[in-house]
Amino acid sequence: MLNLNWLQTFVTLVDTGHFTHTAEKLFMTQPGVSQHINKLESACGHALILREKKSFDLTEQGRLVYQYAQQLLMSEQHLFEQLIFDNPDEGECKLACSGALALMLYPKLLSVQAEHRKLVMQLKAAPNHEILNAINTGDIDLGIVTNMSSDAQKSSDFTVEQVGHEALCLILPVKYEAQPITEQLLIDLGLISHPDAKHYLSLYFSQSQLPFFTNTRLEEIPKTGFVNQINQILLPVAKGLGFTVLPQSIVDSFNDQESLTIFKPDKPVIEMLYLVKKRNRVLPARFEQVSSLIKSSLLAQIE
């Protein structure tokens, strides 16, 4: 790798056009400047300047080295500026959460971006394991995950903060509003599946503590549809084509709630929410307002 001091001397020499002025500007002696240029030419294996008395011209190789050195020095300066300049209203925020939370949080994040136009909100909807992997590799700065195991919470890879919970709902077509929920009814109706359906359904069955839920095998429930767009999952349920399990926030945002009925178990079914970042990573100042927004939004959702 070429010596950065030699490159700095070379750029200054080209910019000033004079060995003496270069020496003065860099607080060097004129022989010291000549020595740097000679060493740089030796390292490059080519003459970089054609000396003519007290002046010089660049060779073609010299022009290429000058362009390279300028880019390198500018990149270094930009790096130093980034290291010392942490504007809370500027930069990228790479976040990830479930599709349900993304539907609720993204408009609020965009409101912050609209107020501070140099902030860039990048929100990815993904399952838990993908979010944790992305945080670990640095592809995501901050994530919201659910169902965080005690081992994962104690992991040396992450810093985990519980920030709220989300209610899960068993949702059926409205015509079943007055009917008791039984295992046979769910089998006859069929599941409108989605990427998180198995996880939500398993959690709902285990937490609700109803005997027929506890004994029901998920694989015995036929699937009558599949949708991977979070805001479309309730459409087939509203049309009487099946049931599903989703967070309350998705039901609240659906524009045809009159076509749905939500089963009310004796014990509410909730899923804990955790804010996760890579352990020992100090996030830029801009994440203070993002974290605060996430926490306040989830708290408001609980209340």
Image (cartoon, rainbow, N blue to C red):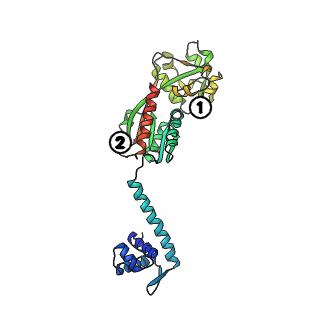
Q: Is residue 93 above or below residue 161?
A: below
| Residue located at (51% from left, 75% from top) | 63
For label 2, the crowd category at 10 Å Cα-Cα, with few meaning under 14, some 14 to 19 and many 20 or more, is: few
Give the camera-side residue of 249 and 23: 23
CA distance separating discs 1 and 2: 36 Å
Please tell me whether mark 1 or mark 2 is closer to you in this view: 1
Q: Amino acid at mark 1?
A: Asn
| Residue located at (63% from left, 27% from top) | 235
Q: Position of residue 68 (x, y in %)?
A: 48, 69
Disc sitting over residue 149 in the figure: none
Q: Position of residue 84 (x, y in %)?
A: 38, 54
Q: Which quadrant holds residue 142?
A: top left
> Is the C-beta separation of discs 1 and 2 under 8 Å?
no
Give the camera-side residue of 222 and 51: 51
Q: Which quadrant holds residue 180?
A: top right
Disc sitting over residue 156 in the figure: 2
Q: Position of residue 94 (x, y in %)?
A: 48, 44
- Image quarter hosting the C terminus: top left
Tag 1 secondary structure:
helix
Can residue 241 be seen at all in this image of the molecule? no
Q: Is residue 198 above or below residue 263?
A: below
| Residue located at (63% from left, 23% from top) | 238
Q: Amino acid at mark 2?
A: Ser
Q: Earlier in the sequence, mark 1 or mark 2?
A: 2
Mark 1 — residue? 231
| Residue located at (37% from left, 79% from top) | 35
Q: Is residue 40 above or below residue 82?
A: below
Can residue 133 be seen at all in this image of the molecule? yes
Q: Position of residue 161 (x, y in %)?
A: 38, 35
Left or right, residue 222 beside residue 84: right
For label 1, the crowd category at 10 Å Cα-Cα, with few meaning under 14, some 14 to 19 and many 20 or more, is: some
- Image quarter hosting the N terminus: bottom left
